[in-house]
Image (tube, rainbow, N blue to C red):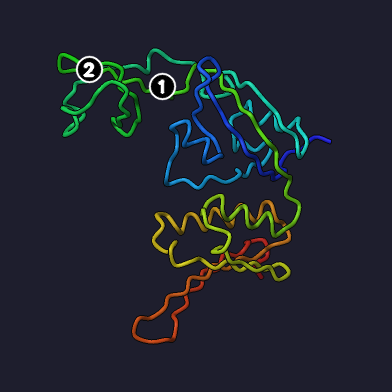
Amino acid sequence: MTLEKGSLILINYTANIKDTDKIFETTDEQQAKNSNVYDPARKYTPRLVSVGEGWVLKGLDEALANADGGDKINVDVPPEKAFGERNPSKVRMIALRKLGDKADEVKIGDEVEIDERPGIVRFVGSGRVQVDFNHRLAGRTLTYKVDIIKKLEKEEEKVQSLIKRRLPLDDAKLQFSIDGENLVIEIPEESFLTEGLQAIKRGIATDIFKYVTKITRIKFIETYESTESTKPFEQVNRIEDSAVQK
């Protein structure tokens, strides 16, 4: 039986550019290191996907919708279902001075941002720089090797994965409890200064209300320990589903 739309699944995958076989993304930490795409700021764990909801590239999403839990699939994703075809009009010559303090250091292949648009330097010379604003994988066919680990069925599994999707935490530091329709999530101290934490909590709540419909009320708890007293200060953030307001 194929996975229905909205199924929450965990997948491991490695993705490469088909014509060069160069790996550009993987959930395998050792594979990332071996392929020189390792990002120390990233946690290499199975990825959560909601089938058919656009959480992954269109071509991969379609392949997952025709797979079963536990399958291993290889899928080629053409440009029109990945990052689009290359658009020549997105390659522009720009005055080198627009790069500001970095103008003297820029070289071919560097990633730059101009007018809040990311681009890749293709040419430098005569006081000008050619910047390609196409996505770096535009026009490329991509190959994904995917292992569908499991379909999430239990409420606890869904809640845990939905929290970690937006707030990457080690399992030992992820504390939550479900009591009927109520969910309490404890935010660890190391996450207090996470940029955009309030928006992250709102996103977590929105996801959980959608995929764990039994839950209608969520509380986020942040506990601060005083350095002068053993009595803790506790801040409680409550997010409630408007549909259950009295």
Question: In the rendered image of this protein, does residue 182 appear above or below residue 26?
Answer: below
Instruction: Indicate left or right for 138 with 209 as reference.
Output: left
Q: Residue 215 at what x, y percent from top left?
A: 69, 62
Q: Secondary structure at mark 2?
A: strand
Question: In the rendered image of this protein, does residue 174 appear above or below residue 153?
Answer: below
x 44%, y 82%: residue = 232
The mark closer to the camera, 2 or 1, is 2
Residue occupied by mark 2? 124
Question: In the rendered image of this protein, does residue 29 appear above or below residue 122?
Answer: below
Q: Amino acid at mark 2?
A: Val
Q: Amino acid at mark 1?
A: Asn
Q: Residue 180 at what x, y percent from top left?
A: 73, 69
For the N terminus, the quadrant is: top right
x 69%, y 45%: residue = 8
Toward which corner of the image does residue 134 lie, by quadrant?
Answer: top left
Q: Which is more N-terminal, label 1 or label 2? A: 2
Q: Secondary structure at mark 1?
A: loop
Front position in the image: 130 or 69: 69
Q: Which mark is residue 134?
A: 1
x 62%, y 45%: residue = 48
Crowdedness near tag 1: few (<14), some (14–19) or many (≥20) residues, C-alpha within 10 Å:
many
Q: Residue 3 at what x, y percent from top left?
A: 77, 37
